[in-house]
Amino acid sequence: MHPSTLAKRLNFLLLLVLIAFYFYGLGHLPLIGPDEPRYAQVGREMFLRHDLVTPTLGGHTWFEKPALLYWLQIAAFKLFGVSEWSARLGPALCGVLTVLAIWFLARRIERSTNEVPRTFSQTAALIAASCLGLIGFSRGASFDIVITMTTTWAMSFFFLAATNVDERKENLYVIGCYFFVGLSLLAKGLVGIVIPGGVIGSYYLLRREWPNRRLWLSLLWGVPLTILVSSAWYAPVIYKHGWTFVNEFFVQHHFARYLSNKYHHPQPFYFYPAILLLLTLPWTPFLVALLVRVGRWKWRGTGITDQLVVFCFAWLLFPVLFFSFSGSKLPGYILPVLPAVLILISLRVVQIEAPSSSWPIRTTGVLWTVLGLGGFVYGWRIEHLSILCCVLSAAPFLLAGVFVLATNTRWFVQAVAASVVVGVIAVLNCGAASVVRRESTRDLLRVADAQGYSNLRVLALPGDDRSAEFYAAGRVIYGPYGEVTPVYDVPQLVNEARARHERLLAFINSDDLKFYRDRTGVEVIADNGKLALICLY
């Protein structure tokens, strides 16, 4: 067998393994954090009510985000039942579709020009599928990966149409662009049109060009198409809820969130460049190498790769700048720029002529070696995991790093990508469960259910952990505005139970257990080291 044929088959096999890995162990860990449990619960409430229009949380309308993620969850709940796995299935599928969009764009470019090697599409797919930022967000019930998928397809279709990669399919590409912009509006609101519009405008600005006549004319029918697609949800929800929806969704969760710190997520202006370096792991050294070479790019070059580089840079630059001015900053906001960065990285990798002389490859080897050693030390000394667990979790990263440093081979992409699959699977099955269990109420509630407390209503602490809203669904006590009833101290908890004339379950910080032990009317049920669950009589 010819070596190039063997390489292609091995790449294809590894890519299949990576894609399958996106669906592996989605239910292995509990829902954690402030968002994932809430979004899963909103999807469950819509599913149980057979309602595709009105998102609710604890029976209260919840107009924070649009419906596309909820629709994906509803479909999964219908097919596979309500579970963590089902809640995360839609985002995992979006992660895979993002990888496929990157492969699709690279494949079309690969076939249309001799400017890139015939390995470009497979390399791009492997690099994208093994990116830890993409993997991490694809394994959680997150809106960010949904809009990343829709934006990636929209931008890919636009670039193919704008550069006449395939004139026979140009109209289909334009239709696809407007269609996926409409889906982006359903994925995360107005940002779904702000990002594509800003990226396209920035692209032409950087190239100092004016959009061609066909693009301007396409607005006449493309904008109505985008509105038609997005109206699948916006039309019925506005018709049903009117100004209540408009005020909460657009005014509060769009404009107030962007212009103020109302939702308490302030970060410095340089926050997103630092986050981007983390999201691109393990390929971060190549991102640094790209940024170092910006001054050498042919900004007005006519070659397809010159245009691709400028387009991806615009795709990176505009969202980062846009969200850097926001009063509220979260890491997931810039996830839609990740595909552009991965395409640029892939282009840089396939253009390397001598792997042994490329410092990004050596730096990747060093980075992966340090990650393996650091992960071992952290698991053993900080999380107190077993030696065997630490070895199994750290070994894939350490071995891949040493392999890259020792061999100076063109197989470094395959080695690093394979280590991501094996390493993350080892972490999921070994160390992650014991670490994450302290970040979720799931196991505490299971203990209470086993002791016969499954019918009691629950007072959940407000804060970063909202998992009780999913695992104690229908039992959490909410205030008049759809937030959990805030209780913080002993007298307030006891008075709450007496005022309601019923037994209640309540979550408290483990450090506060000393105030409850041996107290009349209080029974300690379980403690995970961070949170404790008590019963109030």
Image (tube, rainbow, N blue to C red):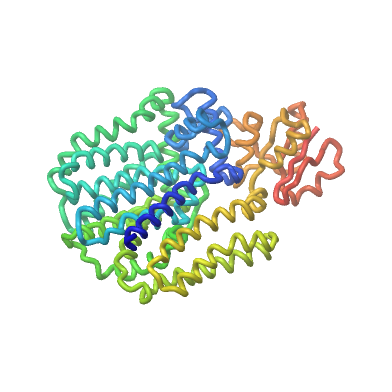
Give whichever of 458, 434 is nearer the camera: 434
Q: Is residue 210 above or below residue 378?
A: above
Q: Is residue 354 above or below residue 109?
A: below
Q: Residue at left 63%, top 29%? A: 474
Q: Residue at left 49%, top 33%? A: 76
Residue 118: image x %, image y %? 27, 58
Residue 410: image x %, image y %? 38, 68
Give whichever of 137, 474 is nearer the camera: 137
For the view shown, which residue lies furthest in the left direction?
213
Residue 335: image x %, image y %? 42, 51
Horizontally, is 52 left or right of 473 in the view? left
Q: Residue at left 46%, top 42%? A: 91
Horizontally, is 74 left or right of 432 in the view? left
Q: Quadrant of the N terminus?
A: bottom left
Residue 269 seen in the figure? no
For the view shown, which residue lies furthest in the front direction?
1
Residue 352 seen in the figure? yes
Q: Quadrant of residue 48?
A: top right
Q: Quadrant of the C terminus?
A: top right
Q: Is residue 497 above or below residue 145?
A: above
Q: Is residue 169 above or below residue 456?
A: below
Q: Quadrant of residue 216?
A: top left
Q: Residue at left 36%, top 60%? A: 7
Q: How many marks?
A: 0
